Image (tube, rainbow, N blue to C red):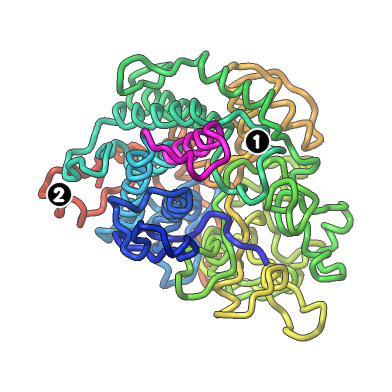
Amino acid sequence: MKKILYTISIITTALLVSCSQEFTDTDNLYEKSFENYYSRPQDIDEALGGIYSALYMPDIYSDEAVTANLLSDFVLGGGGPDDRGAKNVDGFQDPEEDTYKDLWVITYNGIYRCNAVIENLEGADFSEYFLTDVEAKQYVDQAMAEAYFMRGFFYFRAAKFFGGMPIIPSTQADRNVPRSSYSDTYAQIASDFKTAIELFPSKPFSSIPTERYGHANKWVAQAYMARAYLYYTGYMTNMEGQATSELPLPEGGAISKGQVVAYLEDCINNSGYGLVDDFRNLWPYSYVNKSAGKVVLPWAEAEGLEWAGQDGLSPTFGTGNNEFMFVQRYSTTDWDPGQQYNNRMRLFFGIRDNSMIPFGQGWGWGTVSPVLWNQWDDADPRKEGSILELGNPEQGTASWQSGFGDHETGLMNKKYTTIQHEDPDGVDGVKGMFYFLYDMTHGDPMQLWSAQDFVFMRYADVLLMHSEITETADGLNEVRSRAGLGNIGYSLAALKEERKYEFAFEALRWFDLVRWGDVDDAFGGQIDVQNSGIDATYSVQYRPETKGLVPIPESEIRLSGGVYEQNPGW
């Protein structure tokens, strides 16, 4: 059975610990505190688990995968008449005061945990737990690198949505400080990523043990430095009108374009990551026929698809995946500890009130814009690999019935959606594919069986970022070649098109539109839809006064005593 490889835990001031030590130990293992907690590798491993647990958001609107997709031009709000929240996010409205509160609060939970690990590992001597001093230092460096990377990650994730963030550099620092400027926030992000890159070992992906899958490494940090560089320089140039080609550092100086290129080329040449043979083998629908023990998705059978899996090079299921670099690990779960440990994008963006084989039902958010479908060349296999055409027998959706949701277009995303089939053993009836793969036996299966990992970074993005920064076509054409498309010369327009089709529904499109300054022109057209069976038109107007940012939670502004200022347009 699959397990989340970083422990989902919350570090509190007192922790139960193992009593596996000899009874003659003088340390009190039963009364752990912040003063003595970080004294053993076991403590650090648990603390890192607490850091990674801050990836998970209890409230759905603070889930990056859901909200970033709803904000983009690729999907419509959808859902049912009562799903006003999804429509508000999609429509750049926020009548509620705390829509994104969890994203703000849990960001700082994660940052505090990172600070605690960093502070307690500085100068730490763990040599008594290892055979050599070298091994002890390698362990400390790895843990420190992960803490620095994740602190940068948390600031970056929040800054993409909120803009400038309060910088809390230590566990003892004043928490009621004003929001830093946009540039100072990204300087902190760059510094954390840079420190992580310098601390991480240069181990190729193939030599990283399977049990470490899901943890950050040097190559992930390098890729995120490039992503932060592109986002910062693009936002400052195109949204703020302050052209720049450098990512600042808090101690002075900056990360230059050349440094970012060097990071990416190190990753390309030495990381061991690559592209899987077929783009469509990245997604679980390519495994459903094998899981079902018979053909339930004729298109996948005809195309010879074979899932790469989602557990690295040696997955429990699949052929091996060397493309996924950093993911949010999910598992089958129960209502306690919480639904957030299940991939809710698959549930919320599933087909509304239609339970078919192999595509099951969900809440119907994020219906796909027909504009994207019509613009996409039929010769590109990523089109049918990314978008599910409802009512198509080859796609297993012949029995689809419209009229159950809003903003229906007859199109849904295929990368993250509920997949199901009959029990091959004839016992449990129709259940989700992950229910069978991971022996799920508890909870409400329809809402809790979505154990598909969400991909934050994959190697295709490394190649396309390299092309964008160097203005060369090599990486772009490598991605196109995997899709069976011919080589082209580099242009920014071609690069934009390639990212559009390669990363549809992967929560990157909205941020690309913002950093390119294209967001003003991406919305406003009218789309024919059905709202609960009634013909209608859909149109969203982006509000440029928001500068691509969402509102700071009002309760956090009140708690700060007015120290925080609300974002423009909100």
Looking at this rendering, what residue extends furthest in the bottom direction? Answer: 427
Can you tell which mark lies on residue 459?
1
Q: What residue type is labelled 2?
A: Ser
Mark sitting earlier along the chain (2/1): 1
Up-down: is 52 above or below 261?
below
Q: Classify mark 2: residues with Cα within 10 Å, few (<14), some (14-19) or many (20+).
A: some
Q: Which amino acid does label 1 sit on?
A: Tyr
- Residue 374 % position (x, y): 67, 46
Per the rendered image, the range of residues in magenta is 123-147
Q: Residue at horizontal 77%, vertical 53%?
A: 307
Q: Residue at horizontal 76%, vertical 70%?
A: 398
Q: Residue at horizontal 38%, vertical 27%?
A: 191
Q: Distance between the residues labelled 2 and 1?
A: 40 Å
- Give the main secondary structure, helix, strand or loop, of the magenta stretch: helix
Q: Residue at horizontal 48%, vertical 69%?
A: 339
The image quadrant of residue 94 is bottom left
- Residue 328 % position (x, y): 54, 52
Up-down: is 237 above or below 444?
above
- The N terminus: image quadrant: bottom right
- Residue 248 % position (x, y): 36, 21
The residue carrying mark 2 is 560
The answer to whether residue 407 is visible is: no
Looking at this rendering, what residue extends furthest in the left direction? Answer: 561
The image quadrant of residue 409 is bottom right
The answer to whether residue 44 is visible is: yes
Instruction: Judge by depth and name the residue closer to the eye, 81 or 193.
Output: 193
Q: Is 132 within the magenta? A: yes
